Image (cartoon, grey):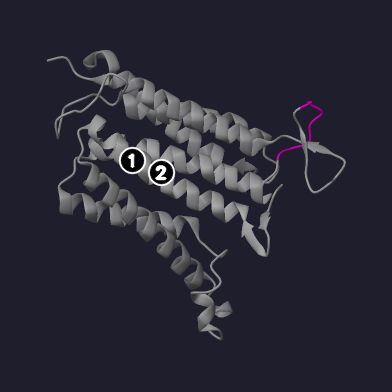
Amino acid sequence: MFPALEIGPLVIPTGVFALLLGGWLALSVVERAAPRVGGVPAHLYALATAMIVAGIIGARLSFVFLHWDAFQENLLGIVWPLNSGYELWGGLLFALAAAWLQMRRDQLALGTVLDGLLPGLVTMLVFVSLSDFLGGSGYGVETTMPWGLRLFDLPVKRHPVQLYEVLVGLAALGSWFYLVRGRTRLPAGANYTRNSILIPSAIYAGGRLFVEAFRANSVVVGDGWRVVQLLCLAVLAAALWLYAAAAPAGSENGVKAG
């Protein structure tokens, strides 16, 4: 839609700018969320930073490994340019490994980490969708709805599916802040239920499961199964099952009584 922002002689890729802004805001959200989940801000901030750095490096190295034939004659291409060429699953594995090491180092509880990282993760996903919208790399199916958008001056209108994803992310983020509204500062290691993890996760997964149907360039496997929908369905089912199993033990705002 708006792939570049021109300021005089300077041309800024809007998609990359959105990702950088999203990363900074995600780290800020994690830092501010830490006291509400019984975590130490510095520890959760360090964990989130380690995951982002390791994820980027891992995604790049994984891409280079999988496409080594394209790099062996030009080793400089491994480190420049960096505006494309990343493998998602490799980055995810590196990020999880970094998280595990950081959790062991700072002796962080899994519940505290998940609750503290969740708003930052959703914030980042919102900006990933926004980057996708600005860069024009993703697009929706054709529509006659009045809010449909024309891409690249083409006559046909398409669903602004990335903006739908942004709205889903904002709804999940809003639910997290609503669920922790009664928490100001929990003592480190405080015991609370999983509501502020499971409910926002269910909202985001359920929303993405629905809006992915409007995406025209989804990654599919097998007989046309959309990968994102399969992942979201698994997350939604797990979140609802765990919520139902944990519900009797909880009380208002997700903090255990007594």
**In the image, residue 226 above or below residue 236:** below
Q: Secondary structure at mark 1?
A: helix
| Span highlighted in magenta in the image | 140-146
Q: How many marks?
A: 2
Q: Are marks 1 and 2 in contact (CB under 8 Å)?
A: yes
> Residue 221, can we see it?
no
Q: Amino acid at mark 1?
A: Val
Quadrant where the image shows the C terminus: top left
Location of mark 1 (residue): 30
Q: Judge left or right: residue 97 versus residue 70.
A: left
Magenta part, dominant SS: loop
Answer whether residue 201 is magenta in the image: no
Q: Residue at x 68, y 46 (%)?
A: 217
Q: Residue at x 42, y 23 (%)?
A: 175
**Can you give x and y, in whole percent of width and height, for residue 184 in the image?**
24, 25
Location of mark 2 (residue): 26
Q: Give the alpha-carbon distance from disc 1 to disc 2, as whole Å.
A: 6 Å
